[in-house]
Image: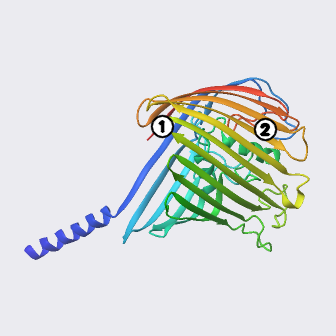
Amino acid sequence: MKTKLAALAALAGCSALAHAQSSVTLYGVVDTGLLYQSTSAASFSPSAPNTGKVFRMKDGGIYSSFWGIKGNEDLGGGYKVNFKLQGSFDSGTGKMQLSDTPGAAAIFNQVASLGVSGPFGTFTAGRQIVPMIYAMADTDVRNAQFFGSVLTAWLGLNTAAGWPGTSTNGAIGALYDSNALVYQSPTFAGASIALEYAPGGVAGQFQGGTRESVVLRYSNYGLNASAVYYNGHDTNPAPGVAPTGVDNNRFVYVGAKYTIRDFSVSASYGNGRNPSHADKVNLDMLSAGIGYRFTPALQVASAVYYLKDRNRAENRSTAVVLTADYSLSKRTMVYAQVGHVNNRGTMDQMLVYGQPVAPGVGTTAAMLGLRHNF
């Protein structure tokens, strides 16, 4: 009897040890607010007309609402197997958000990945948030948020290059990449590198639809600096046209943010172009911003984002934003945001992610919202 009890105790101990070496976490964010915008459009089409003022409940004033499941297994020796499943939803309607397929939603439209981490760094495979957006957020006082930031300016480059906004598959780089292989190095003296390769999977065209990027990041002594090189092989062809890998879209970016005590300043430059057809797509993006943290809970930031078409001087856009975030607790924040964008020519830079503006039409927007992490 004692032998049986000892055996059961040993099995229970092994089970507890195995459980201790693995973890699974359910997590998420709900972010919702009220948005007023003085002009609007029904789509990102280059011929979309101005549909007038809009007042609505809007998901994602800071970032989108999402939920996810993540976990890992400790293999020992500093090595782990990690998985992550994450999808965004509209907090106003409960609907799932867009995927790579035009007009189609997906339950895990942001992340569906499996990887291994260890002393060598982290290797991850699957659908992922692209490494370059983290580098851009590091060097933007607005942290690449969904209202008036380097993210919305970058999306403005994409719409200027012909992205219709019906999927997450942007021309000058996407926020999410499917079938991506990403290596993230450890940090050495504040510096790190991320490498991405996402095969296109197009039969008969080895490079068709593939994406490659190299991202360098540095963070030390109050300075964040980053550099990005991205190359997409026919990642946004015309409808019904199979990607061949010849018609590339490229994006380069350099940026820096410096923080001393409670004061931050940032500046960046980016260029999106099609080397095969530089006469059609050659777009510049510049930004500058300042931020100040009045208290640990209250932060205010202001920034300007400028887009310019190198081929057509009449196509240009300037967005100016002013925002305030106040943390009610470690998990809950209220925010107020206001901005104005002046679009000229065919430019249609948006102030709010997912809220189109008609080409050549300016707009003023304001949003009050609440964000809660769980």
Colour scheme employed for the rendering of this structure: rainbow
Q: CA distance from mark 2 to mark 1?
A: 42 Å
Percent coordinates x, y for residue 242 in the rendering: 83, 64
Residue 262 drawn above or below residue 271:
above
Percent coordinates x, y for residue 175 in the rendering: 66, 51
Percent coordinates x, y for residue 142 in the rendering: 60, 38
Q: Quadrant of residue 303?
A: top right
Nearest the eye: 111 or 359:
359
Which quadrant is home to the N terminus?
bottom left
Q: Which mark is residue 274?
A: none
Dot 2 falls on a residue whose secondary structure is: loop
Q: Which mark is residue 261?
A: 1
**N-term-proximal mark, 2 vs 1:** 2
Q: Residue furthest left?
A: 2
Tell me: 307 left or right of 191: right
Q: Amino acid at mark 2?
A: Ser
Residue on which the image places disc 2: 43
Residue shown at 43%/37% (left/top)? 331
Residue shown at 62%/27% (left/top)? 367
